[in-house]
Image (spheres, helix red, strand yellow):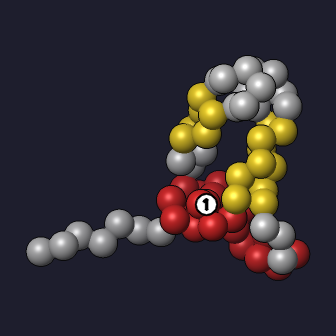
Amino acid sequence: MDVRCPSCGATFTISKDYLAQAITKAEKKKHKYHSVDCIRCRKQVKLPINDMRRFAAPMDEEE
């Protein structure tokens, strides 16, 4: 999942393994967002859990 920082504009990628761990952790605590630190400016970027689920889901191949 590609994430863009709203403060400095840096773009970075979050792996599917990290997404899966963050989703399970957020579901236990019933959170709607997960925060990630920007790699350049270290400010927090809020990621909606629904968007994270969409990117973490395996792609179904249509035949």
Q: Residue at x 65, y 55 (%)?
A: 18
Give the percent coordinates (x, y) of residue 58: 41, 68
Q: Residue visible at 63% across and 67% down?
A: 50
Q: Is residue 11 above or below residue 56?
A: above
Where residue 30 appears, as percent x and y from the top left, is 84, 77
Label 1: few (<14), some (14–19) or many (≥20) C-alpha neighbours in 10 Å: some
| 8 sits to left or right of 60 | right
- Residue type (three-letter) at the residue carrying disc 1: Met
Query: From the viewer's perspective, is 17 left or right of 35?
Result: left
Q: Residue at x 70, y 59 (%)?
A: 48
Q: Which residue lies at the image location 23% right of the left edge and 70% below the top edge?
A: 61
Instruction: Please tell me whether residue 29 is drawn above or below residue 35 in the rendered image.
Output: below
60 w.r.t. 40: above or below = below
* Residue 43 position within the rendered picture, expressed as x and y whole percent measured from the top left: 85, 31
Furthest residue in direction front, as rendered: 6
Residue to which mark 1 is pinned: 52
Circle 1: element type: helix
| Residue 21 vs residue 9, the one in the foreground | 9
Instruction: Locate residue 39: give its quadrant.
Output: top right
Q: Is any part of residue 21 visible from this angle?
A: no
Where residue 20 sits, quadrant-wise, is bottom right
